[in-house]
Image (cartoon, rainbow, N blue to C red):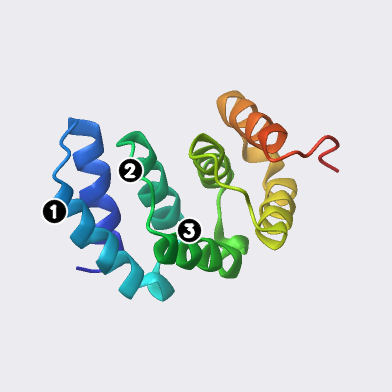
Amino acid sequence: FKPQDVSILILGLSRMGILDAGLVAAMQGRARETAGDFEAQEIAQLMSALAIMGIRLEPDLLAAMQGRARETASDFEAQEVAQLMSTLAMMSIRLAPDLLAAMQARATVTAGAFLPRDVVLLLMSLASAGVTNPD
């Protein structure tokens, strides 16, 4: 499975309400193995789908996805920034300062593309991350 396959499979399972622990564990393992190949959309989709399913990410996978998000921050679209940030907030995951800075910078660059829903998600996630003045 390639990163796109992993994220789409997990997204599909989450939308259908199917929780197959063995399959999810296998896909988390595959995501960890291929983390360096994940693109922005795939990171946001995978993290969001796992959160919807109520699955806590394995620590190694979480570290790999946060690292890859930092590396690919300049590729994130507005919706993906909002999705990733709100997902991390929903999962009560404390953001690494460099990832927070990278996502704030990307949100600034893509500000004109945010939909109202995305603005709300982003502001709520920034607040939960302890950001009081999102300059």
Q: Earlier in the sequence, mark 1 or mark 2?
A: 1
**What is the number of the mark on residue 22?**
1
- Tell me where residue 12 appears, x and y as whole percent: 21, 41
Residue ID for mark 2: 55
Label 1 crowd (10 A; few <14 / some 14-19 / many >=20): few
Residue 124, image quadrant: top right
Among the 4 quarters of the image, the one containing residue 4: bottom left
In the rendered view, would you say 42 is above or below 14? below
Q: Nearer the viewer, residue 91 or 49?
A: 91
Q: Quadrant of the N terminus?
A: bottom left
Q: Which residue type does callout 3 highlight? A: Ala
Q: Of residues 33 and 110, which is closer to you in this image? A: 33
Q: Dot 3 lies on which element?
A: helix
What is the x, y in percent for residue 15?
Answer: 24, 33
Q: Relative to 92, is 61 above or below?
A: below
Of the residues tagged 1 and 3, which is closer to the observer?
A: 1
Q: Split into 4 quadrants, where in the image is the C terminus?
A: top right
Q: Earlier in the sequence, mark 3 or mark 2?
A: 3
Numbered badge on residue 40: 3
The percent position of residue 98, horizontal first and vertical second, equals 71, 62
Q: Which amino acid lies under the numbered mark 1 shown in the image of this protein?
A: Gly
Q: Secondary structure at mark 2?
A: loop
Q: Residues within 10 Å of mark 3 (few under 14, many from 20)?
A: many
**Sequence-earlier tag: 1 or 3:** 1
Amino acid carrying label 2: it is Ile
